Image (cartoon, rainbow, N blue to C red):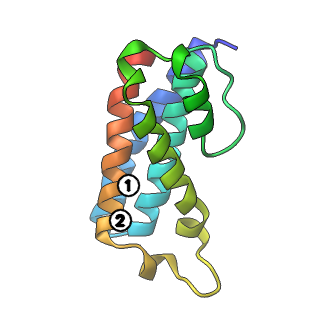
Amino acid sequence: MRNGELARDYLRRARVRLGALDVLFEAESWADVVRESQEIVELALKGLLRSCGVEPPRVHDVSAILLAERHRLPTDLQCEVDWLADISRQLRRDRELAFYGAEDLTPTDFYSRTDASAARKGARRVVKFVYPQVR
């Protein structure tokens, strides 16, 4: 399925959410920065896949699809696919934990400034790579 308008909408929303990351970061809400970064990466990568004619699955981690469909992605991004897949996979692992925690883990106590910085940097980098390809 190729729906350029929907792909562009995903990227527009991902870009808007980058601003939310800064607000959350300034509030030192590290777990929320990690969670929001995952959602930004998910939206951006699903927008990329849609723009290339690949129907993204209804899962939070699209790394397997990115790797399998590498040949359909823009040439400029093909050298970044391994990294894009890695960041998708890494942030997906933290998605629920950063939001809900666990019986023995409180997200606020578990995530650090370092975790939030890395997640925010990754989200920004994904949007930076993907946005020009989808516009």
Residue under the point 72% across and 38% down: 58
Q: Amino acid at mark 1?
A: Ala
Q: Tell me the residue that label 1 is attached to.
A: 119
What SS does tag 2 mark?
A: helix
Q: Identify which residue, 135 or 55, lies in the foreground.
A: 55
Q: Is residue 22 at least partly visible in the picture?
A: yes
Q: Amino acid at mark 2?
A: Asp
Q: Identify which residue, 104 or 4, lies in the foreground.
A: 104
Q: Tell me the residue that label 2 is attached to.
A: 115
What SS does tag 1 mark?
A: helix
Q: Which x, y percent locates residue 101?
A: 58, 75
Q: Which x, y percent locates residue 91?
A: 49, 54
Q: Residues within 10 Å of mark 2 (few under 14, many from 20)?
A: some
Q: Residues within 10 Å of mark 1 (few under 14, many from 20)?
A: many
**Real-space CA distance between mark 2 and mark 1, rounded to the nearest whole angstrom:** 6 Å
Residue under the point 62% across and 14% down: 53
Q: Identify which residue, 21 or 119, lies in the foreground.
A: 119
Q: Which x, y percent locates residue 26?
A: 27, 63
